[in-house]
Image (spheres, helix red, strand yellow):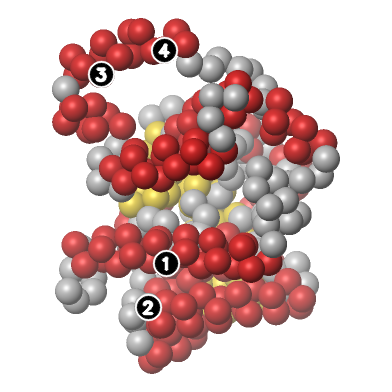
Amino acid sequence: MEKISIIGAGTMGHSIALSAAWAGQQVKVYGINDQDLENADKSLTNKLKVMVDNDMFDTEKAHRIRENIRFSTSLEDVISGSTFVIEVIPEVLEMKREMYKKIEGLAGEDVVIASNTSGFKPSLLAEEMARPNRFVVTHFWNPGHLIPLVEVVKGKHTDEETVQRAMNVLTEMKKKPILLNKEIPGFIGNRLQYALFREAQALLDSGAATKEDIDAAVTYSIGRRLPVTGPLMTADMGGLDVFSAISNYLFEDLSTDQRSGETLSRLVEEKKLGDKSGAGFYEWEKSVSEQFNAEREQTLIHFLKNDLKADGEIAE
């Protein structure tokens, strides 16, 4: 079993640590200061409580999971003895490259360095590394402890041993890793997500429907099917002749916008950034934010519980 270190104690960092510790792995997490680690510890405690309240595991198991995670502000301490390092710091290219230099200076030659980046190509991130063959992207989805998918992306210098080690460690963490055969911007999940988001923006900007009805068109139709069948399997089940015919006449009318839509651009200019600012496409009063975040969390727990039952990880 790999010895895992996580560089970054933010939202994704401590959530990934929870996933690893839940699978029985010992994890060390690096934070930039004591306040950073205090916030991570508080968030981790809250997440464990929610999992216990939803019968994902009992209080004793939650205690063992917490004991498997150790926080530190010493990068040297966190890297020491590690065989698999996951970088989860802000999406700033030079910041990431500088961190890789520090890690390589402290880690052994066989240590894998994985990035949780959601956008940078691995070859770009690894340009200044001494051992780019040991570098790979492992893109977890937020919230990292509840969403199974992890996208594994190899760079042009990544060797097959590194890829296999990444796939193995993620499988041990009870994740569902998928492997990209080539580097592409946005990987797979974000390309699909933003294709849908582009069309939703175009529909709103054209006045085709209200924001509420556009969202409802997803949550009450394709959103109900997607947890079971992805777009290609859905096409198989609906008939490829039907899907081909619709593609042939509909594609030419779909949005091909190359930039953010009119409404989105205006909201950003007005500093209406969504939940985090209190307003966006919707108004986000504190009570509304808490309600929808709780509902989303409960739904994700429901699906994860079903996954774990199917895999025999928890009892029916």
Q: Which residue is mark 1?
A: 298
Q: CA distance from mark 2 to mark 4?
A: 43 Å
Q: Which residue is mark 4?
A: 251
The amino acid sitting under disc 4 is Phe
Residue at image coords 64%, 68%: 287
Q: Does the CB distance between marks 2 and 3 fall below 8 Å?
A: no
Q: Does the CB distance between marks 1 and 2 fall below 8 Å?
A: yes
Residue at disc 1, secondary structure? helix
Residue 175 position within the rendered picture, expressed as x and y whole percent measured from the top left:
36, 57
Residue at image coords 60%, 21%: 206
Residue 41, visible in the rendered structure = yes
In the rendered image, which quarter contains the C terminus?
bottom left
Q: Does the CB distance between marks 3 and 4 fall below 8 Å?
A: no
Q: Which residue is mark 3?
A: 243
Q: Nearer the viewer, residue 246 or 27?
A: 246
Quick check: 242 above or below 75? above
Q: Please give the count of numbered marks on the rendered protein.
A: 4
Residue 238 position within the rendered picture, expressed as x and y whole percent measured from the top left:
18, 27
Query: Which of marks 4 and 2 precedes in the sequence?
Result: 2
The amino acid sitting under disc 1 is Gln
Q: Nearer the viewer, residue 13 or 268?
A: 268
Query: Which of marks 2 and 1 precedes in the sequence?
Result: 2
The amino acid sitting under disc 3 is Phe
Query: Which of marks 4 and 3 precedes in the sequence?
Result: 3
Q: Is 287 displayed left or right of 309 in the figure?
A: right
Residue 193 position within the rendered picture, expressed as x and y whole percent measured from the top left:
48, 36
